[in-house]
Image (tube, coloured by chain):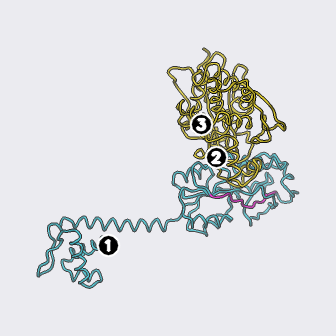
């Protein structure tokens, strides 16, 4: 059983894991791989994909010009390891480039600026309209960071992360609990990917824009690492907070049907870097996708 | 009204056929027994006995209700006995083999327990299935939905072959590390391995499940090992103090456990 092999991969890496994979563009949908795919899981930065779809709706409805510019002062943004979050000086960039930074390097500052423009209500409306009933987004990176600092009694996100990465203390922070933080299910996320890949959630032009940004994601340590082959395209979005490591992606072999895969993990170890878990995400995705491949068409 | 007590009167009077003899058997005087039966009859709205000059006899209703009174009293007795059995039952505690005999004795002395030894993976399964009441597992471990206590760091020592010049972890680079296999709990194993590597030691691993196997490997000069037994001494084996980060991390897991027992077990571990 492929599901048992995937469970064994998670256990070996010392992590809990949830996975859903299904081929796209296939009617009837046929087989899928389901490892507790309907359980609620913590989203982390995977939420940025939903936010991007909501932003593209504003573009499409003519409420926002993708090429109009916005001035961002990094000093007033959520700290983060990448993108504008790392800059020292204010910058001016277009909304669509801001979206590119949010998606390709998981830029926290860019995401918070976009969430400020789009609004949580529009994100919620999108989830309801598209019947993503297992998904709930309660705020952006800034909100998660604020809650984390409050719960750990720290004044910077760096201090907060240092505390939750200590293996000698077990901290129950709400950022780890799908009941209290932005949450989804693996099946909801593969469904969102299928909507994006079939031009169903926004216009064909906007869906192509989203697919392009997901294809340019720089990280290759998770799902991409499972497919180190020349003729495979992996378009994904990762999500990471403390012991939570996720990625959702569409894997496209040349000449085959694309396959959507969503992997969510929660490690036993608190360490901020666990290459073994990243590798387990790659292996679990590879096992699931290989099992579902249509073969050359 | 204490129904069970009054049913006791009913059954005894029915068996004796006489209030006085029934009272004698119950270790009481006659008036409270006869008043008790009357109270029961009033409560039920049914006459249980016909009272004549030669004694008392069951009415047809009383005859029909008597077996059910026996059944209720029997069930009550079994209920109390089962509660007693649960009260007196030993708490089934599981521990990892890395926990020393010294700590196991401390646990056994702290509460009424039976102790079994297994890997973290097996212990978590056993607590999940109800085979064990609680377990001290090697932290960090996948504990799924179990309740968990805080992380307890138990001071540990390196065991090295006698005469080996080792004043710290880094001096052990020429020896393999004898320890429980990775399959016992991958996260805890990997964490310890990473701590050794960060400290400058990247050893080969040889499987040795408990102190006995570790001591045998060390005395044979084939490996070094770790123990959390504060008193372990053995021929051919030297103890070396190590940094606190190499302590044995354990965590108590359970599904439901009394606070008193949990505190006793935690006390034994710290």
Q: Which residue is mark 3?
A: A121
**Relative vertical location of residue B62 with respect to residue A95 in this rendering, above or below:** below
Q: Which residue is mark 2?
A: A176
Tell me the SS state at disc 1.
loop
Tell me the SS state at disc 3.
helix
Marks 2 and 3 share the same chain: yes
Q: Which residue is mark 1?
A: B2
Q: Residues within 10 Å of mark 1 (few under 14, many from 20)?
A: few
Q: Chain B takes which shade in the image?
A: cyan
Q: Chain of mark 1?
A: B
**Relative vertical location of residue B55 with respect to residue A176 in this rendering, above or below:** below
CB atoms of marks 1 and 2 within 8 Å: no
Q: How far from the left and from the top, in percent, is residue B113?
A: 56, 65
Among the chains pictured, the one given yellow colouring is A
**Relative vertical location of residue B109 with respect to residue B94 in this rendering, above or below:** below
Magenta residues (range): B149-160
Marks 3 and 1 share the same chain: no
* Residue mark closest to the camera, 2 vs 3: 3
Pick out the residue farthest to the bottom: B29
């Amino acid at each position: 059983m492929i599901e048992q092999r995937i469970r064994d991969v998670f256990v070996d890496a010392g992590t809990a894991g949830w996975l859903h994979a299904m081929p796209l563009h296939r009617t009837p949908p046929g087989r899928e791989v389901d490892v507790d795919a309907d359980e609620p899981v913590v989203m982390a930065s995977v939420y940025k994909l939903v936010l991007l779809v909501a932003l593209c709706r504003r573009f499409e409805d003519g409420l926002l010009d993708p090429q109009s510019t916005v001035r961002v002062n990094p000093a007033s943004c959520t700290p983060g390891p990448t993108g504008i979050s790392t800059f020292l000086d204010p910058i001016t960039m277009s909304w669509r480039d801001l979206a590119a930074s949010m998606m390709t390097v998981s830029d926290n500052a860019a995401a918070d600026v976009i969430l400020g423009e789009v609004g949580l209500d529009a994100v919620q409306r999108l989830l309801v309209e598209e019947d993503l009933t297992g998904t709930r987004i309660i705020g952006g990176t800034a909100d998660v960071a604020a809650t984390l600092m409050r719960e750990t009694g720290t004044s910077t996100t760096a201090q907060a992360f240092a505390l939750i990465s200590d293996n000698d203390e077990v901290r129950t922070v709400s950022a780890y609990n799908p009941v209290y933080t932005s949450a989804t299910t693996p099946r909801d996320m593969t469904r969102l990917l299928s909507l994006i890949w079939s031009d169903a959630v926004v216009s064909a032009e906007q869906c192509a824009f989203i697919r392009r940004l997901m294809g340019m994601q720089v990280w290759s340590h998770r799902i991409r690492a499972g497919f180190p082959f020349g003729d495979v395209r992996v378009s994904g979005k990762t999500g990471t907070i403390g012991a939570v490591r996720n990625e959702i992606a569409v894997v496209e072999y040349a000449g085959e049907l694309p396959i959507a895969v969503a992997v969510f993990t929660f490690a036993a170890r608190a360490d901020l870097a666990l290459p073994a878990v990243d590798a387990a995400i790659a292996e679990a995705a590879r096992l699931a996708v290989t099992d579902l491949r249509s073969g050359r068409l | 009204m204490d129904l069970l007590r009054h049913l006791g009167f009913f059954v005894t009077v029915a068996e004796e056929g006489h209030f006085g003899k029934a009272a004698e058997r119950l270790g009481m005087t006659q008036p409270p027994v006869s008043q008790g039966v009357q109270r029961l009859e009033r409560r039920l709205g049914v006459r249980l006995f016909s009272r004549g000059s030669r004694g008392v006899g069951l009415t047809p209703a009383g005859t029909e209700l008597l077996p059910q009174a026996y059944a209720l009293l029997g069930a009550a007795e079994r209920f109390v006995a089962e509660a007693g059995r649960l009260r007196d039952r030993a708490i089934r505690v599981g521990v990892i083999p890395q926990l020393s005999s010294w700590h196991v004795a401390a646990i056994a002395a702290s509460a009424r327990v039976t102790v079994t030894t297994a890997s973290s993976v097996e212990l978590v399964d056993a607590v999940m299935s109800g085979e064990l009441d609680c377990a001290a597992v090697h932290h960090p471990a996948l504990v799924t939905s179990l309740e968990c206590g805080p992380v307890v760091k138990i001071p540990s020592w390196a065991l090295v072959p006698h005469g080996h010049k080792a004043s710290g972890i880094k001096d052990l680079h020429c020896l393999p590390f004898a320890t429980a296999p990775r399959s016992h709990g991958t996260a805890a194993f990997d964490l310890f391995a990473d701590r050794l590597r960060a400290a400058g030691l990247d050893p080969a691993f040889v499987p040795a499940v408990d102190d006995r196997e570790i001591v045998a490997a060390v005395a044979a000069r084939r490996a070094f090992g770790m123990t959390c037994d504060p008193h372990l001494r053995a021929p051919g084996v030297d103890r070396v103090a190590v940094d606190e980060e190499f302590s044995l991390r354990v965590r108590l897991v359970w599904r439901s456990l009394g606070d008193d027992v949990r505190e006793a077990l935690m006390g034994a571990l710290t």
